[in-house]
Amino acid sequence: MVEFDTDVIVIGAGPAGASLAGYLRKAGATACVLEREVFPRFHIGESLLTMSIPRIASLGLDLAKAPYAKHKPGAYFHHDDSGENLRIDFSHALSGSFPYAYQVERQYFDHDLAECARALGADVRYGVEVKGWSEDQRGVSVTGEFGSLRGRYMIDATGQHAIFGRRRRTMDALDRFGQCASFSTFGNVSSEFAQRHVGNGDITILLIDGGWVWLIPLPEGRVSVGVVEKSPKAGTTAEDVLLGTLAQSPFLAPFFAGAERIAPIRRITNYSYYNLEPNTARCGTVGDACAFLDPIFSSGVTVAIATAELLAGEIVAALRGDRELRLDEYKRTCQKGYVTFDRLIERFYRPDWVRNVFFASNREDRLVREFTSILAGDVWRDDNGIQQMLINARAPGRKLAGKSS
Ligand SMILES: Cc1cc2nc3c(=O)[nH]c(=O)nc-3n(C[C@H](O)[C@H](O)[C@H](O)COP(=O)(O)OP(=O)(O)OC[C@H]3O[C@@H](n4cnc5c(N)ncnc54)[C@H](O)[C@@H]3O)c2cc1C
């Protein structure tokens, strides 16, 4: 009798799970991905950072040819009240940072990435929900209505569902960041004002009283828009917040003139957290199941894919040694990325810092490049002075660093 159905059971076929399975296959391990939804399915989070692009290509997906992808050369930040602004051009980063990214309609992107994992040999199963698991000294058995499956290792890539951390009660919510996002998609966004700001493919981040707004251009005149509130007002609906903000903002009203809403208005709340004990001897977490921070810098998918590559390397080393996982180094590397974005996001919610530091003009070229590399998601290098400064800055609280298991 064969003891294991597969080397690695990956739960969830979002960007984290799909890329992990792809990397595992490329390294010669077998992987079975169990995804509860039938793809394509809606997902928020359309704006990629540049450092994800070579990795996505290495997994077999060429976004230059994808009809759901829009070229993204930079990011434009605009203060709604004062009109102060700053444009980041991704081609003006430190040497080695990839120069451009894409914005993608996630239902198609996620599906294609999962199918790339399948093309690499992963066993990808849709409509299969994992309900439980048990870990023993030799492996992990997962269960659900499908029956059971046994692997040498199990990785939780279930995104915000984070089944591993929630069941083990190791999730630590962060209340320092935005708490509530109300969002939708508009079509026929063709005003001259909109063209001026997102016509070249830049993401626009608009800073408003009490939060910020994303404007993510997608193919064929579609734009994803979301309002993030730091302290949501009790009793307001997602419609109140999104449509009210669009009507009142001097930037957004002309932007959406003549446009029509083509998707439901959705809301997500309380989405920032760390999993304080994300890994065990036979199980690990990757992507949002490990941690998620406020999406202002669009870091989620890029960090998920980059850390999936690292995790695949650790799993394959364990497989070769026929041993348990040793994920301390993986955890430290993940934390370097998370801490960098955490400290930057935390500053972004300080109005004085934004006015006096972020929007300050006449920066030295080196500083511009360092900052751009961070916003490109190039956060695992050792020559970035701004990143070092952020990492060494005083932690806002215990919750940032987590336990060091
Ligand atoms: C408001 C908001 C805006 C965002 N904007 C951006 C952005 O612009 N750019 C960006 O990069 N990121 C953004 N993000 C974050 C981004 O969406 C996530 O970081 C990214 O989707 C993480 O990928 P993942 O694979 O870890 O999780 P997911 O993409 O969520 O995938 C997890 C998968 O697991 C499946 N699953 C869950 N439970 C089970 C189960 N029990 N059994 C089987 N399958 C299961 C789910 O169906 C899902 O398909 C945003 C997030 C929010 C909340």
Image: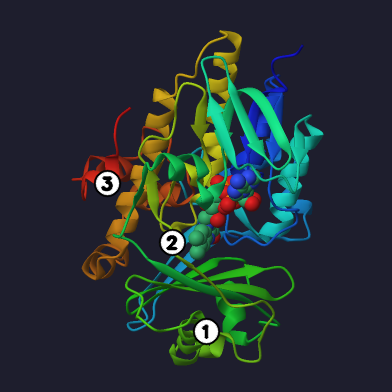
User: Which secondary structure lies at badge 2?
Assistant: helix
Identify the image quadrant of the C terminus.
Answer: top left
Q: Is residue 299 visible?
A: yes
Disc 1 secondary structure class = helix
Using the rendered view, name the quadrant where residue 34 is placed. top right
- Look at mark 3 in the image and give the residue it sits on: 399
Q: Amino acid at mark 2?
A: Ile
**Relative to residue 39, is residue 192 drawn left or right?**
left
**Ligand 1 closer than 8 Å to label 1 CB:** no
Is any atom of residue 309 visible in this view?
no
Identify residue for label 2: 296
Disc 2 to disc 3, C-alpha distance: 19 Å
First along the sequence among labels 2 and 1: 1
Q: Earlier in the sequence, mark 2 or mark 3?
A: 2
Q: What mark, if any, has residue 239 been given in the picture? A: 1
Q: Are marks 2 and 3 in contact (CB under 8 Å)?
A: no
Q: Residues within 10 Å of mark 1 (few under 14, many from 20)?
A: some
Q: Residue at x 30, y 39 (%)?
A: 402
Left or right of residue 12: residue 286: left
Label tally? 3
